[in-house]
Image (cartoon, rainbow, N blue to C red):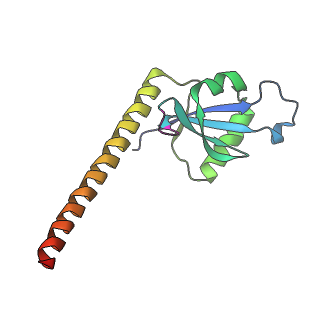
Amino acid sequence: MEKAIPVILRVEGRRTKAPADRRDLLAVFPTEVGTNDPRTMVCYSTIGQHGACIAGYIGEKTRPATEEEQARMLRELRAVGYENLRVVSRASSAHAKARREQLRRDYTREWSLRDERVTWEKKAEGYLDRVRR
């Protein structure tokens, strides 16, 4: 069985008078890094779709989603392909550690691919030098 993906469900705007079906719901994936900065997380918005947000944004600019809002967002997430989600209330230090590990793996893979490309380029140059002689 696949590991559950933690998700934080929030509503943008601390005090909004918009009708319930017009509020911008936000799903934050605390174990998925948003950019090359470990403080960022992948987020999904009903209006803007995928993006990145910094950890401080969640507490400052959003409020917890009600059960009705959570159900609506989970339906939308499943409709776009997310499965096996586990709703959590906040990002933990374990989530931050997972983001750092993901960055480390991605960075290491990127550099190993770069080094491999450089090695092949050097081999190709050596081969071309021998052929030209």
Q: Residue at x 88, y 30 (%)?
A: 17
State the image coordinates of residue 75 (x, y, percent, origin top left): 66, 46
Within the magenta stretch, is there residue 34? yes
The quadrant of the picture occupied by the N terminus is top left
Q: Residue at x 44, y 33 (%)?
A: 99
Q: Nearer the viewer, residue 102 or 133?
A: 133
Magenta range: 33-37
Q: Nearer the viewer, residue 119 or 38?
A: 119
Q: Nearer the viewer, residue 99 or 37?
A: 37
Question: Would you say 114 lies left or right of 96 here?
Answer: left
Q: Nearer the viewer, residue 123 or 35?
A: 123
State the image coordinates of residue 102 (x, y, percent, origin top left): 39, 38
Q: Residue at x 26, y 51 (%)?
A: 115
State the image coordinates of residue 25 (x, y, percent, origin top left): 72, 38
Q: Residue at x 42, y 39 (%)?
A: 3
Residue 101's place in the image compared with 112, above or below, is above
Question: Would you say 68 lies left or right of 96 here?
Answer: right
The quadrant of the picture occupied by the C terminus is bottom left
- Number of numbered discs on residues: 0
Residue 117 sits in which quadrant? bottom left
Identify the main secondary structure in magenta: loop
